[in-house]
Amino acid sequence: MVRFMGVVYFLLFLIPLFYVLRFLSRTSLLHMVVKSWQSLIDRFHVYQFYKVPQFNHNFQENQLYRKISVYLNSLPNIEDSDFTNLFSGSKSNDIFFQHDNNHSVHDTFLSAKVSWTNEKSDVDGIRSYVLRIKKTDKRRVFRQYFQHILTVSDEIEQRNKDIKLYMNLATENERWRSVPFTHPATLDTVVMDMELKNKVRSDLEQFLKSKQYYHRLGRVWKRSFLLYGPSGTGKTSFIAAMARFLSYDVYDIDMSKVSDDSDLKMLLLQTSPKSLIVVEDLDRFLSEKSTAVSLSGLLNFMDGIVSSCGEERVLVFTMNGKEHVDQLVMRPGRVDVHIHFPLCDFSAFKSLANTYLGVKEHKLFPQVEEVFQSGGSLSPAEIGEIMISNRSSPSRALKSVISALQTDVDSKTTVKVAQALTSSGSGRSVDESGEPGTVFCRESVHTVREFRKLYGLLRLGSRRKEEPPVVPLDRSSSAKEGSRHERMIV
């Protein structure tokens, strides 16, 4: 009987306890109790802290910081962190977690419990990862744990290699901000002379394998390219193709946001190895004679001492034209490879037609070639846009290209005639008749006659057919009319 009553009392105690725990599990009270208990236990342990800053004392990126960030964002228990950021991936149905700043992420390695916190310095604004680990565990697993982090992060980066585009900011605390680089251009899709494209491909492949060769020569392992040509000729697409071929991140330097020479050096120091550093429209920057960055600062950026503080970099500069650029900028060592991007010719047009329209041969090709030979020229971007707009009908696309090229030929002819008239108008002389107010220029009359010959023969011929017969004049009156006609032409 006593035993029975004991079981009853136990059940009476257990049932309310069950409902209490069930209630607490649905509220934050249980979480608060567990957290308080964990905090109490922590007071009886001695911890050691390690800080991993984002930049070293030379303001270069700390590669360990980046690898720790990759590792922590891959942990399954990052979802249990107090605050976690959600981002969409490269695919529309991908969602991934990212560690939030100033919040802790817990990890376990060989039964040792550790925690990571991302903190921002109030002094210089540099972020750091702070590791908290028990001193007893530190002696046992410290080196193995960091080796594990490096191995896992390398595997993740190799598996999910995404090229990033870095842009410089005008703020002091954060100089670079990155976004995914999703430009689809490749060396195969770039419209370029095939022989030149193969030379560039071979040059880049050789550069990737030349670390020991550069070191044997006592040179920094870097390469610099100059891409020059009119707008719309494919320079930006070629940069994207180079980045994809090399699998390098792209650092796009906006010179208008660079405050001075030292700031430009600092930006270079904060780039990572295996990177493509781009400065676009360099000729425009040089012509503006900016007071922020001097020519000396630019030259030091290209091949000065600071440029040697990092390897496996490719520098790319773009220009619309290099005729008026100081040769100090162009010398070997500062620019190793010059690549010209001209306006579209017939050969490039055929490549565009094959790429955009899937057409290798067409009955309109001879007519297109004839217009090109007549002096018509458009940029690959202009022709590509015409083909995109008319991609459902290749014939209509080709006719539109012919029309655009013919318009370009006509506009060039008009400009030439206008220039000839302007230049000839400056060579006027006084008529031999000596009459005051009468101006006569042999070159001007000759140019106008050529103009009439080119554009007015048909109209004059038809007009003569319609005019009534003219009564012949005597020789003296004809001479006067001829003199008057000459003056009217001028």
Image: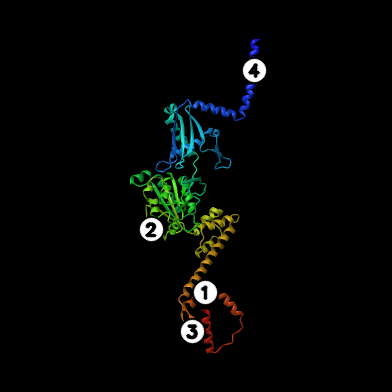
Residue 400 x/y as whole percent: 57, 60
Task: Tell me the mark number nearer the camera, choosing from 3 and 1.
Answer: 3
Q: Can residue 326 be seen in this view?
A: yes
Mark 2 and mark 4 lie on one chain; the one further toward the N terminus is 4
Mark 1 and mark 4 lie on one chain; the one further toward the N terminus is 4
Amino acid under disc 1: Phe
**What residue did someone put label 3 on?**
436
Number of other residues with Cα within 10 Å of mark 4, as a class: few under 14, some 14 to 19, many 20 or more: few
Give the distance between the C-alpha atoms of the residues marked 1 and 4, in whole angstroms.
Answer: 115 Å
**What residue did someone put label 4 on?**
11
Is 130 positioned to the left or the right of 3 in the image? left
- Name the residue located 59 percent from the left edge and 30 percent from the top edge: 28
Amino acid under disc 3: Pro
Residue 425 x/y as whole percent: 48, 75
Number of other residues with Cα within 10 Å of mark 3, as a class: few under 14, some 14 to 19, many 20 or more: few
Secondary structure beneath disc 1? helix
Q: Which of 444 and 383 is in front in this view?
A: 444
The numbered mark at residue 327 is: 2
Secondary structure beneath disc 2? helix
Give the distance between the C-alpha atoms of the residues marked 3 and 4, in whole angstroms.
Answer: 132 Å
Secondary structure beneath disc 3? loop
**What residue did someone put label 1 on?**
451
Q: Is residue 17 above or below residue 116?
A: above
Q: Do the residues labelled 3 and 4 touch (CB within 8 Å)?
A: no
Mark 2 and mark 1 lie on one chain; the one further toward the N terminus is 2
Q: Is residue 202 visible?
A: no
User: Quadrant location of residue 196?
Assistant: bottom left
Number of other residues with Cα within 10 Å of mark 1, as a class: few under 14, some 14 to 19, many 20 or more: some
Number of other residues with Cα within 10 Å of mark 2, as a class: few under 14, some 14 to 19, many 20 or more: few
Amino acid under disc 4: Leu
